[in-house]
Image (tube, rainbow, N blue to C red):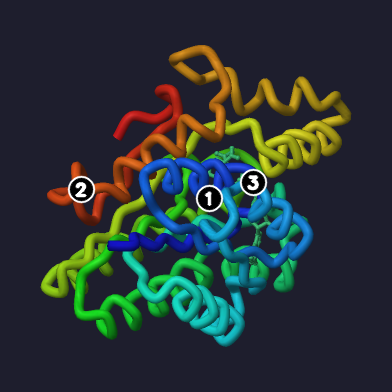
């Protein structure tokens, strides 16, 4: 049986690491990203025929549905959906604009809702269950300074995960979330830079603001997160639903 997983935001960073891990676990990989260039480069990292990219902005339901349609038509099935795409601008309270609110919630929350809807449609159509796995953050468990929009959106992802776990359980669908800590990706270096500029400091200082409370005393690799998502996508997690698994080296305990 061909196992198929879709990972959004898999053009780089955590999403790409997840796609590679799921491929190593035997999945064919559908990559959804709004950056066509990185998505194409990501596909080239897989053996010929094992990965397929479809461009979409996850905040746009029609675009995301179309991307799912293309991937499912290409591989013929769907078993796992990882709603990973997200954005994280630093947003000190007085600087927040309605446009930023719509962008961050549209992508981080809308992307999870629309991706879950599309997953549900295909799990029903194929008559088997499936797994929906959503990206939240340690900042979605404990409010982080200067991240009001981002933290709020990631709290919402945990809420949606819990509700969908209850709503879809009867159909053999589990819904879980992963909450990374401070991962060495373009996103995290971007946040550290913004916070540093706002404070008139350098980027290392910005990173230290987030890194100083890590119990294991090292920043996260994207693979630390991908390992957990591999578990959530596989059969060993079949009795887990509604939970957020925190993979942050011990920043928040909940
Ligand atoms: N890097 C970190 O320290 C942490 C990241 N996370 C979460 O993990 C997820 C992945 O983060 P990173 O890999 O670090 O980010 P990243 O910025 O390095 O990569 C994100 C990817 O998603 C794509 N993307 C962004 N918005 C999109 C949209 N509207 N439609 C389609 N694709 C879109 C980008 O093109 C990029 O390929 C995000 O949801 C993020 O919030 C959570 C906790 C910590
Ligand atoms: C970007 C993020 O999720 C943080 C700082 O936890």
Tag of residue 151: 1
Q: Tell me where residue 82 appears, x and y as whole percent.
A: 43, 58
Does residue 27 lie above or below 220 as drawn?
A: below
Q: Tell me where residue 106 appears, x and y as whole percent.
A: 59, 72
The residue that appears at 50% across and 32% down in the rendered structure is: 223
User: Between tags 3 and 1, which lies in front?
Assistant: 3
Mark 3–mark 2 CB contact (< 8 Å)? no
The residue that appears at 28% across and 85% down in the rendered structure is: 125
At mark 3, the secondary structure is loop
In the image, taking residue 212 as reference, residue 22 lies left or right, namely left
Residue marked by disc 2: 235
Residue marked by disc 3: 45
Disc 2: CA contacts within 10 A as few (<14), some (14-19) or many (>=20): few
Q: Tell me where residue 198 appears, x and y as whole percent.
A: 83, 38
Label 1 or label 2, whichever comes before in sequence order: 1
Quadrant for ligand 2?
top right
Spatial separation of the CA atoms under disc 3 and disc 2: 26 Å
Disc 3: CA contacts within 10 A as few (<14), some (14-19) or many (>=20): few
In the image, taking residue 109 as reference, residue 89 lies left or right, namely right
Q: Is the residue at mark 1 in contact range of ligand 2, meaning its CB lies under 8 Å from it?
A: no
Mark 3–mark 1 CB contact (< 8 Å)? no
Give 32 or 182, whichever is nearer the viewer. Answer: 32
């Amino acid at each position: 049986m061909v196992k198929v997983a879709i990972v959004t935001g898999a053009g780089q960073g955590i999403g790409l690491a997840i796609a590679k891990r799921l491929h190593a676990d035997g999945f064919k990989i559908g990559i959804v990203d709004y950056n066509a260039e990185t998505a194409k480069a990501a596909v080239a990292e897989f053996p010929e025929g094992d990965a397929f990219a479809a461009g979409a902005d996850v905040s746009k339901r029609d675009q995301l549905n179309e991307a799912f349609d293309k991937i499912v038509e290409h591989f013929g099935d769907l078993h796992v959906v990882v709603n990973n795409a997200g954005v994280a601008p630093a947003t000190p309270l007085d600087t927040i604009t309605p446009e930023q609110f719509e962008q961050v919630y549209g992508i981080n929350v809308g992307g999870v809702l629309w991706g879950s809807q599309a997953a549900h449609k295909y799990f029903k159509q194929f008559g088997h269950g499936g797994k929906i796995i959503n990206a939240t953050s340690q900042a979605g468990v404990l409010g982080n300074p200067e991240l009001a929009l981002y933290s709020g959106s990631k709290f919402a992802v945990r809420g949606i995960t819990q509700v969908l776990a209850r709503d879809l359980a009867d159909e053999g669908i589990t819904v879980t979330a992963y909450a990374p800590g401070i991962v060495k990706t373009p996103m995290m270096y971007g946040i550290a830079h913004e916070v540093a500029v706002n404070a008139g400091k350098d980027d290392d200082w910005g990173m230290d603001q987030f890194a100083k409370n890590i119990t294991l005393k090292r920043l996260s690799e994207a693979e630390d997160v991908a390992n957990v998502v591999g578990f959530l996508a596989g059969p060993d997690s079949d009795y887990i639903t509604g939970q957020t698994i925190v993979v942050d080296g011990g920043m928040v305990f909940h």
